[in-house]
Image (cartoon, rainbow, N blue to C red):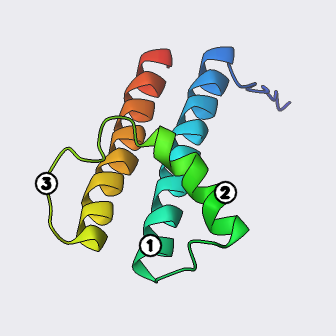
């Protein structure tokens, strides 16, 4: 006779996945903004403005952290650091929740 056990997901595991997903979404927003700037998207476009309005507050204290003369490189470095920050923080919090 075969006995099957159903392993449900724990609440802690679910919370960790949610935190990881939120951190990934924040990082994706930062990366999309970087790509829009690097690829020269029209700053007057509604979508570009929308992404910028999401990315700028999520960048926290990173914009202007390093004084870089090239504006495109400044966006890559500053917003890229913010994306990495969100991934690291979300991973750390998720690990604490497990």
Residue 67, disc: 3
| Residue nearest the viewer, comparing 72 with 28 | 72
Label annotation for residue 28: none
Q: Residue 72: percent from the left, percent from the top?
A: 30, 72
Residue at which label 2 appears = 50
Q: Residue furthest right?
A: 1
Q: Report the quarter where the N terminus lies.
A: top right
Question: How packed is label 1: few (under 14 Cα within 10 Å), some, or many (20 or more)?
Answer: some
Q: Is residue 95 above or below residue 72?
A: above
- Label whose residue precedes the other's in the sequence (3 or 2): 2
Residue 9 in picture, x, y percent from top left: 71, 25
Task: Say which label, 1 or 3, has the lower sequence index.
Answer: 1
Q: Which mark is residue 37?
A: 1
Q: How far separated are the C-alphas under marks 2 and 1?
A: 13 Å
Q: Nearer the viewer, residue 81 or 71?
A: 71
Give whichever of 56, 25 is nearer the camera.
56
**Mark 1 to mark 3 CA distance (whole Å):** 18 Å
Cα separation, mark 3 vs mark 2, equals: 26 Å
Residue occupying image coordinates x 58% and y 79%: 42
- The secondary element bearing badge 3 is classed as loop
Q: Identify the residue shown where x is 30% and y is 47%.
A: 63
Which image quadrant for residue 60?
Answer: top left
Q: What's the residue at 47%, 55% (across, down)?
A: 30
Task: Tell me where residue 87 sits by quadrant.
Answer: top left
Other-residue count near label 2 (Cα within 10 Å), few / some / many at <14 / 14–19 / ≥20:
few
What residue is shown at x 56% (from left), y 26% (from top)? Answer: 16
Q: Is residue 22 above or below residue 14?
A: below
Under circle 2, the secondary element is helix
Q: Position of residue 5 (x, y in %)?
A: 78, 25
């Amino acid at each position: 006779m075969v006995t099957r056990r159903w392993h449900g997901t724990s609440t802690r595991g679910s919370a960790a996945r949610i935190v990881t997903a939120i951190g990934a979404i924040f990082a994706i927003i930062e990366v999309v903004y970087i790509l829009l700037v690097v690829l020269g998207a029209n700053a007057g476009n509604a979508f570009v403005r929308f992404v910028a309005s999401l990315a700028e507050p999520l960048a926290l204290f990173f914009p202007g952290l390093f004084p870089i003369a090239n504006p495109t490189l400044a966006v890559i470095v500053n917003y890229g650091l913010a994306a990495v920050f969100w991934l690291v923080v979300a991973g750390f919090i998720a690990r604490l929740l497990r």
